[in-house]
């Protein structure tokens, strides 16, 4: 395999748009997603951007986006294609927008796709903003026996290695992992580009393969049970204080300092 | 080829996000600097905003009139000054070429206009001629196979940025009305053109209008839009361009009215007087409710007009009705939205102060409200007579 022949696989998830005010369903079984605006998970957008930058820098040859979920995830893949991914794979694994495919099932399907596609790098978001699992990348790495570098705030490809700076408690850690590897990306890695109108038009012509979970022989039925979903506690109104002394006194009174 | 619904929703989504994340935060900078920052200009080029209405085969997006209307509405949720930058390429500056240009003219200009590499201006208005555009005085005198252009144009949007002007000039001195007028495509670097310094205006800071003076400017007869056969037919081009342009301006009005109403609603929910948010006072509710109803009426009239235009290729009565109603509506909404802000609405710290000034123009350019009324009434009379 030549120097520039690296393929990057980017899994992208369709989630509730980060601008939408989330509402819990009346029965507490989850969040109401009917007729709600959905978008690409913001961390996945960062992953797509990084993959495209690797391609633009001549470090990667092809960027393949994958989405696993409902059929409408096609729109999310079109966004990835409009940003600059070369082709896309849609794995239809649910027909109800409320059915969340759990990280293990996603990781198993991704592992099969990795076998088929043979990428040198899987670039994923560190977590999805809907369920905040932070698990898919790690599980995929375990299933494949590949190296992993999580919470990336900088990624460099050096020969057969990826040099990744990670956001850890109390600072930054730089590690070197052998490829093929899995990198999960954090918020500060880059600022994703907007899908421009001409590129959205061009993306219409890029290939998008449609598969199902059965094609990969993976059982996606849930293993976790959601016991209860509740709204976050409402924010209490603030209080204006005349000066710093009063502020300190109040905070002491409340036992905060 | 046209843009399918799914793709269009994606385009709209991308523009809405760009508006929210990039354009709105840059508004005060545009106001302070009276210019659009170069990096935003570049981004707007990359986004493809200059090419909305230019066919895909010439590098544009090729939106239908209805799609263009909805996209312009979304874009004008941010300061309408950003729209003005792309507005002449999307509307009056490019549409003459799209509608009536020769293949060679299309090939020569449209790709550069679609990418935003070149800006197009539309030069019809003159110091002595505004609403009565058919009686324009700028002359293009024949000299062999060339024409010699002399005259002054006024309030020409984007003239300081233009690479090409669509200039309307009298080619038949014996015919004083629209029948003696031709439309020319004039590269901005042609000798004899002076662009004066930009006008000082009430609002829409960051947009540029100027006088453009032509002194013995020589241009070939191939510069006539549609070629030499279109000699003395330029006024029809102008009217066709302005007809479609009315849908565009009405869409601006709907977009900015929505922004102003949202600003007013947000303010009314947070401002407390007499022990409760002013949104709870019935007289404030009346201001908001009246605005909401009119805004919806305008939006749906404009969209129906755009649809009519797409189906029948013209919509004279509806287009003038849309332009009239939507621009007047936007200014009523502006006034009410400012009123809801009380004293704060008069202060530059709040966007409504600027949005109010910006909206005033909509009732004037591309045909004043009185001119729209005239067109509507004439059309009504004509249709009545045809039925009789
Ligand atoms: C910011 C800005 C940008 C512009 N950009 C361009 C551009 O890019 N290209 C271009 O060619 N032009 C442009 N214009 C010119 C614009 O189209 C004219 O200002 C407009 O058509 C009105 O013409 P006028 O200013 O000469 O007003 P006038 O025609 O002098 O009108 C003055 C008043 O008289 C009324 N009036 C006139 N005739 C009648 C009538 N018969 N019956 C009843 N009332 C009447 C009008 O409604 C108005 O209220 C721009 C103007 C502005 C302010
Ligand atoms: C340029 C300028 C100069 C000024 N100079 C002075 C000055 O020299 N001295 C001074 O003391 N003040 C001054 N003012 C303040 C001015 O008098 C107030 O701005 C004005 O009284 C409105 O109050 P407000 O701005 O707090 O608006 P608000 O009272 O917050 O009103 C906001 C909106 O709510 C409406 N509203 C409020 N209550 C009700 C209700 N119960 N029912 C229905 N509608 C309601 C109002 O009509 C308005 O539309 C000045 C203001 C400006 C803009």
Image (cartoon, rainbow, N blue to C red):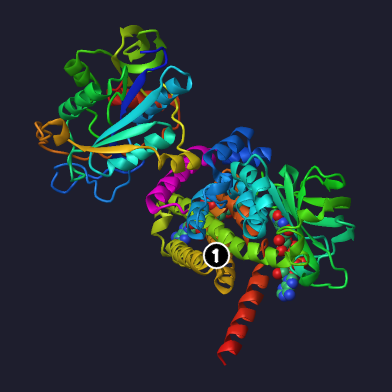
Picture coordinates of residue A78, whole percent (x, y): 36, 39
Query: In this view of the protein, which residue sits in the foreground, A181 or B294?
Result: A181
Q: Is residue B9 left or right of residue B244?
A: left
**How many numbered marks appear?**
1
Taking the image as drawn, is residue B370 in sight?
Answer: yes
Q: Main secondary structure of the magenta part?
A: helix
Picture coordinates of residue B356, whole percent (x, y): 59, 54
Q: Quadrant of residue B230?
A: bottom right
* Magenta highlight range: B1-26
Query: In this view of the protein, which residue sits in the foreground, B28 or B323?
Result: B323
Picture coordinates of residue B54, whole percent (x, y): 57, 51
Q: Is residue B78 left or right of residue B31?
A: left
Q: Is residue B167 left or right of residue A168?
A: right
Task: Estimate how packed mark 1 is, as few (under 14), some (14 to 19) or many (20 or more) residues with alpha carbons within 10 Å.
Answer: many
Placement of B272 over or under A242, stated as above or below? below
Q: Measuring 75% from the left and 49% from the top, which residue is drawn there?
A: B200
Q: Mark 1 falls within which chain? A: B
- Magenta span has B20? yes
Where is mark 1, residue-wise? B326
Picture coordinates of residue A84, whole percent (x, y): 43, 32
Placement of B73 over or under A88, stated as above or below? below
Query: In this view of the protein, which residue sits in the foreground, B255 or A103?
Result: A103
Taking the image as drawn, is residue A39 in sight?
Answer: no
């Amino acid at each position: 395999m030549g120097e520039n022949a690296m393929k990057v696989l980017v899994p992208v998830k369709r989630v509730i748009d980060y601008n939408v005010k989330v509402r819990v369903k009346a029965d507490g079984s989850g969040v109401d997603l009917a007729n709600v605006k959905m978008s690409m998970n913001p961390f996945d957008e960062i992953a797509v951007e990084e993959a495209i930058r690797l391609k633009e820098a001549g470090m990667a040859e092809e960027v393949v986006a994958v989405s696993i979920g409902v059929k409408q995830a096609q729109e999310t893949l079109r966004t990835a294609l409009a940003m600059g991914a070369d082709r896309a794979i849609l794995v239809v694994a649910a027909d109800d927008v409320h059915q969340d495919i759990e990280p293990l099932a996603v990781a198993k399907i991704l592992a099969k796709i990795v076998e088929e596609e043979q990428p040198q790098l899987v670039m994923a978001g560190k977590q999805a903003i809907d369920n905040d699992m932070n698990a898919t990348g790690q599980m995929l790495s375990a299933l494949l026996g590949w190296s992993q570098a999580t919470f990336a705030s900088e990624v460099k490809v050096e020969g057969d290695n990826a040099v990744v700076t990670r956001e850890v408690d109390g600072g930054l850690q730089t590690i070197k992992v052998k490829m093929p590897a899995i990198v999960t990306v954090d918020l500060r890695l880059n600022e994703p580009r907007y899908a421009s109108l001409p590129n959205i038009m061009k993306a219409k012509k890029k290939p998008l393969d449609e598969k199902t979970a059965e094609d990969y022989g993976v059982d996606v039925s849930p293993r976790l049970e959601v016991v209860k979903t509740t709204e976050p506690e409402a924010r209490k109104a603030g209080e204006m204080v005349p000066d710093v002394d009063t502020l300190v006194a109040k905070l002491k009174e409340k036992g905060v300092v | 080829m046209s843009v399918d619904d799914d793709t269009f929703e994606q385009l709209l989504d991308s523009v809405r996000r760009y508006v929210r994340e990039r354009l709105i935060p840059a508004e005060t900078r545009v106001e302070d600097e009276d210019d659009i920052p170069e990096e935003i200009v570049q981004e707007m080029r990359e986004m493809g905003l200059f090419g909305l209405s230019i066919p895909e085969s010439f590098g544009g997006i090729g939106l239908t009139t209805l799609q263009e209307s909805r996209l312009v509405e979304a874009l004008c949720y941010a300061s309408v000054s950003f729209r003005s930058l792309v507005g002449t390429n999307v509307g009056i500056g490019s549409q003459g070429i799209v509608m009536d240009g020769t293949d060679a003219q299309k090939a020569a200009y449209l790709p550069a206009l679609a990418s935003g590499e070149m800006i197009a201006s539309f030069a019809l208005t003159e110091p002595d001629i505004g609403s009565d555009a058919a009686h324009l005085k700028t002359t293009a005198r024949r000299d062999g196979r060339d024409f010699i252009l002399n005259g002054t144009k006024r309030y020409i949007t984007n003239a300081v940025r233009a690479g090409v002007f669509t200039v309307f000039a009298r080619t038949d001195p014996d015919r004083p009305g629209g029948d003696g007028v031709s439309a020319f495509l004039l590269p901005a670097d042609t000798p004899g053109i002076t662009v004066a310094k930009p006008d000082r205006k009430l609002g829409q800071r960051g947009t540029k209008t100027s006088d453009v003076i032509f002194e013995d400017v020589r241009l070939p007869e191939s510069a006539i839009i549609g070629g030499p056969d279109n000699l003395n037919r330029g006024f029809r081009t102008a009217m066709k361009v302005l007809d479609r342009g009315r849908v565009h301006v009405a869409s601006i009005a709907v977009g900015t009215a929505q922004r102003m109403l949202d600003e007013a609603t947000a303010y009314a929910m947070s401002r407390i007087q007499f022990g409760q948010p002013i949104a709870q006072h019935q007289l404030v509710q009346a201001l908001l409710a009246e605005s909401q109803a009119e805004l919806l009426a305008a939006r749906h009239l404009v969209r129906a007009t755009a649809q009519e235009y797409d189906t029948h290729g013209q919509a004279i009565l509806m287009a003038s009705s849309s332009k009239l109603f939507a621009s007047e509506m936007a200014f009523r909404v502006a006034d009410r939205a400012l009123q809801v802000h009380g004293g704060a609405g008069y202060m530059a710290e709040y966007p409504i102060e600027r949005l109010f000034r910006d909206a005033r123009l909509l009732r004037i350019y591309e045909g004043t409200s009185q001119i729209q009324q005239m067109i509507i009434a004439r059309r009504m009379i004509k249709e009545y007579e045809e039925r009789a």
